[in-house]
Image: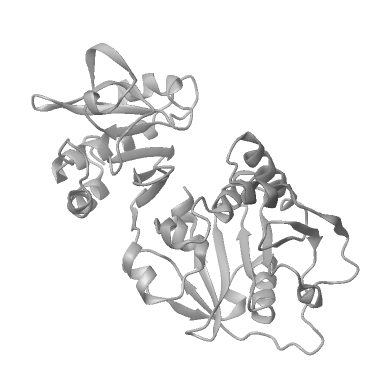
Amino acid sequence: MNRASYPPAASVARTLAEHFRQHAAGRAPPPDADTIERLINAAFWASLRREEGRAPTISLAYVPREDAGTALFVERPLPLDPHTLTKLAPAVERPGIHLGVWPNGNDLVVWGATRNIPAYTFVVEVIEPGLLVIKHRRSGPGGKFANVAVLQGDDVKIIDVHGTKSSTDCPDIVLSLLGFDQEVDNTDNVLLALALSMRAHRHGGSLLVVPHGTDEWRNSILKPVPYTVAPPFSKLGQLVQSGVRDGNFKDAVDAIGGLTAVDGAVVLSDRYDVLAFGAKIVRTESGALFEEVLVREPIVGNVPVKVDPSELGGTRHLSAAQFVFEQRDSLALVASQDGRFTVFGWSLRAKMVQAYRVEALLL
């Protein structure tokens, strides 16, 4: 492959350029297709290099220095090429730091680094060798990021925001991941934070979210429950109620996320109180086995398919689907060791369990 050209960059550039043109909100013009292709090319080839034996993890933001607020500026702009990016990577690998890129004549150059970028700024982030995520900061409170596309080798996934929302009854966590936080009860979605924490420990795990004030969920859990929490661990729920989003909030989220690494599932009320962990899911005595699951992925071109339970994956996925089939007012989040993440919920429209593959939204 020609090191100057990463073919998926060209195939996706026009689509991305149109997306950012439609969402242009700042003073600076959004990148055109040629600029996007050059940014992706540089990031991709840098991702395959090594600096002192380590793969670079960098984030490039297409933003002029005057729009970046307080930032670190270099006296002489640096060329946007894999060698430069690899050399700079150790200094900017911490989350939230972006290398600022902007045209200088006919060239694209790195002018420095910043943590402050306007809403809808084009960002390409290197996650690991050959894996890139195109994203932008959302407008509104918090300014969280929304993924626009994921490129892994020759596999390109464009996130289908509006199509997913309009075509089915999405769980709140999927709406939040897609950027519809204003339509979710908790604008700083707690389940999103828990999903990221679950995925981060890489042990795999399951989280069952059940209605507050009822023990109906126990009918689908093997007795005795090995780790019942009494009284319920309510720290996260109290912080959510108070509106606190400081280090204590993160600690509470990570404490619950860590519990999902224990064999079995964590049971969490919809007020974010931990009721049990290590719970084994079983079918109720009178319950029937589900026959199919509707699998969806919020990606352009994805067609929802009904699959046999045997095609879902391992035990975690099967048991989570069975739980939701019986406890239809609940939600199940399943993280796999290989990075896959699935949200199970009951679809009132399809009248069956639906499984959302959302790992592309969590990168």
Image-quadrant location for residue 250: top right
Q: Residue at x 44, y 32 (%)?
A: 96
Task: Work out whether residue 198 can be spotted.
Answer: no
Across and down, in percent, residue 210 comes to: 69, 68
Task: Work out whether residue 36 can be spotted.
Answer: yes
**In this view, which residue lies farthest toward the top?**
75
Q: Is residue 350 left or right of residue 79?
A: right
Across and down, in percent, residue 351 comes to: 53, 86
Q: Is residue 279 left or right of residue 360?
A: right
Is 110 above or below relative to 311? Answer: above
Q: Residue at x 63, y 76 (%)?
A: 329
**In this view, which residue lies farthest toward the right?**
224
Number of numbered discs on residues: 0
**In this view, which residue lies farthest toward the front?**
242
Image-quadrant location for residue 252: top right
Q: Is residue 135 left or right of residue 177?
A: left
Q: Give the image's coloring scheme.
A: one colour
Across and down, in percent, residue 72 comes to: 34, 16
Image-quadrant location for residue 211: bottom right
Across and down, in percent, residue 118 comes to: 29, 36
Is 18 above or below relative to 214? Answer: above
Q: Residue at x 75, y 69 (%)?
A: 213
Q: Quadrant of the N terminus?
A: top left
Is 120 above or below relative to 228? Answer: above
**Relative depth, front residue between 70 and 20:** 70
Is 298 above or below relative to 72? Answer: below
